[in-house]
Image: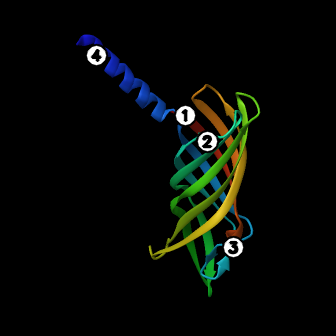
């Protein structure tokens, strides 16, 4: 009877371990820049830089020895805002712009050059919700865009489970670029 319990417990442990084997999680800082001045606040085009803390989870699917794809869901929120000085018909106001929410999906294609060094590309579909708060009145405005974008980067596997990556993202229709620095964990 005891032998059956040990065999059953071993079987459950091996099955549950293999089910979790390809899950990955990522925590990263994303710096979004609107250097082409597309973001409009009261009909004024402004140069805006915002910071986002992004969390993602995905399932890595190996397609070859050194190549895999990972569908991922991503969620983030603003941790660095930007203040703009707006001159509206002679009246000056400060407007604070911040990312309220950042979420979407991407499909990461990764190639491992060595067991430690890798490169990746990822098309993505992301919704960015921005909040603008007027200092003088306290009034808030919201705007959101759902756009396709793309990204890519390089990474280094520090341990078999933990890696660090540096990447670039671009949202074409918004003319918004971003640099991303993150840590990736394989379960």
Q: Are marks 3 and 2 in contact (CB under 8 Å)?
A: no
Residue beneath disc 3: 38
Q: Position of residue 33 (x, y in %)?
A: 68, 61
User: Which of the labelled discs sits on residue 4, or is there none?
Assistant: 4
Q: Position of residue 100 (x, y in %)?
A: 49, 62
Q: Nearer the viewer, mark 3 or mark 1?
A: 1
Q: Position of residue 141 (x, y in %)?
A: 49, 75
Q: CA distance from mark 2 to mark 1?
A: 13 Å
Quarter of the picture holding the N terminus: top left
In the rendered image of this protein, does residue 141 appear above or below residue 9? below
Counting other residues with Cα less than 10 Å from the Cα at mark 4, is it few (<14), some (14-19), or many (20 or more)?
Answer: few
User: Which of the labelled discs sits on residue 186, or is there none?
Assistant: 1
Q: Are marks 3 and 4 in contact (CB under 8 Å)?
A: no
Q: Earlier in the sequence, mark 3 or mark 2?
A: 3
Secondary structure state at the residue bearing disc 1: strand
Counting other residues with Cα less than 10 Å from the Cα at mark 3, is it few (<14), some (14-19), or many (20 or more)?
Answer: some
Q: Earlier in the sequence, mark 4 or mark 2?
A: 4
Q: Earlier in the sequence, mark 3 or mark 4?
A: 4
In the rendered image of this protein, does residue 94 appear above or below residue 159? below
Q: Nearer the viewer, mark 4 or mark 2?
A: 4
Q: Nearer the viewer, residue 119 or 170?
A: 119
Q: Are marks 2 and 1 in contact (CB under 8 Å)?
A: no
Write the residue at 53% across / 45% down: 58
Write the residue at 45% across / 28% down: 17
Q: Nearer the viewer, residue 29 or 109?
A: 109
Q: Earlier in the sequence, mark 3 or mark 1?
A: 3
Secondary structure state at the residue bearing disc 4: helix
Residue beneath disc 2: 182
């Amino acid at each position: 009877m005891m032998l059956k319990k040990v065999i059953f417990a071993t079987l459950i442990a091996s099955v549950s371990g293999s089910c979790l084997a390809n899950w990955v999680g990522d925590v990263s800082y994303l710096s979004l820049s609107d250097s082409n001045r597309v973001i409009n606040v009261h009909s004024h085009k402004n140069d805006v830089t915002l910071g986002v803390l992004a969390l993602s989870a995905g399932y890595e699917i190996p397609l070859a020895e050194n190549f895999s794809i990972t569908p991922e869901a991503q969620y983030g929120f603003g941790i660095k805002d930007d203040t703009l000085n707006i001159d509206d018909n002679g009246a000056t106001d400060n407007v604070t712009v911040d990312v309220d929410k950042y979420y979407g999906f991407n499909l990461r294609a990764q190639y491992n050059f060595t067991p430690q060094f890798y490169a990746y590309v990822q098309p993505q579909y992301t919704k960015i919700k921005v909040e603008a708060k007027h200092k003088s009145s306290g009034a808030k405005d919201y705007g959101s865009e759902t756009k396709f974008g793309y990204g890519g980067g390089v990474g280094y596997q520090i341990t078999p489970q933990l890696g660090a990556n540096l990447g670039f993202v671009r949202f074409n229709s918004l003319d918004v670029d971003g640099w991303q620095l993150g840590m990736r964990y394989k379960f």
